Amino acid sequence: MRKTIVIGVGNILFYDEGTGVYAAAYLKANYTFSPDIDIIDGGTLGVRLSEYFLEYDEVIICDTVSIDDDAGSVYILDDDALSGLGTTAQSVHEIEVTQMIETCKMFGECAEVTVIGMVPEDIEPIAFGLSQRVQEAFPRMIESMIVTLGNKGISIDKKEEVTALSALMTEYANPAAARE
């Protein structure tokens, strides 16, 4: 059985830059999987995530992507396509993810990597949450994640009680208030 992990990457302190982190959290909160998969918040760990690329057979990264397209556009990229974006990367973690894939390939045992990325509207302000445009497109990113997992032979079921994206953003912005 192939081991699969979904890693949400990004920095929730810079608005839309946190899209991948929120997407992974949303998937974990609202769905069950068979066989089980791991879902983690990879934040801005960059090359420190390389152990997952060597330990797992399938790595799905949720992130923003620096592609010249409308904000909210969703892309599904394999690791070869991501390598081609290295020159347009706008954030440190985008560069680190690309470098990590290339480094792991040198070891010869790199996982199959798929990146599900959304074009951000704004990653400049220091602010929690997501822009309105990215929030509106967020269901497309989740659907892309579900389709990708399904194509890898993973069954997905939606939980009866659904956690809204807004609740997840509140929890990340103020964990103490979210528990009250």
Image (cartoon, rainbow, N blue to C red):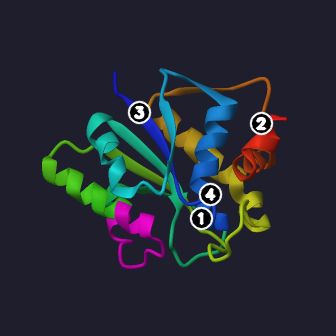
Indicate the position of residue 91 as horizontal and vertical percent values: 47, 72
* Residue hosting label 4: 19
Q: Is 53 displayed left or right of 91 in the figure? A: left
Q: Is 69 displayed left or right of 45 in the figure? A: right
Q: N-terminal of the two: label 1 or label 3?
A: 3
Q: Which residues are magenta?
A: 81-96
The CA distance from mark 1 to mark 4 is 6 Å
Indicate the position of residue 69 as horizontal and vertical percent values: 59, 76
How busy is the neighbourhood of tag 4: few (under 14 within 10 Å), some, or many (20 plus)?
Answer: many
Q: Quadrant of the C terminus?
A: top right
Q: Amino acid at mark 4?
A: Thr
State yes or no: discs 1 and 4 in contact (Cβ < 8 Å).
Answer: yes
Q: Quadrant of the N terminus?
A: top left
* Residue hosting label 2: 163
Indicate the position of residue 107 as horizontal and vertical percent values: 14, 48
Quadrant assignment, res 179: top right
State yes or no: discs 2 and 1 in contact (Cβ < 8 Å).
Answer: no
Q: In the rendered image of this protein, does residue 68 appear above or below residue 179?
A: below
Identity of the residue drawn at 47% across and 20% down: 35
* Residue hosting label 1: 17
State yes or no: discs 2 and 3 in contact (Cβ < 8 Å).
Answer: no
Q: In the rendered image of this protein, does residue 99 appear above or below residue 125?
A: above
Q: N-terminal of the two: label 2 or label 3?
A: 3
State yes or no: discs 2 and 4 in contact (Cβ < 8 Å).
Answer: no
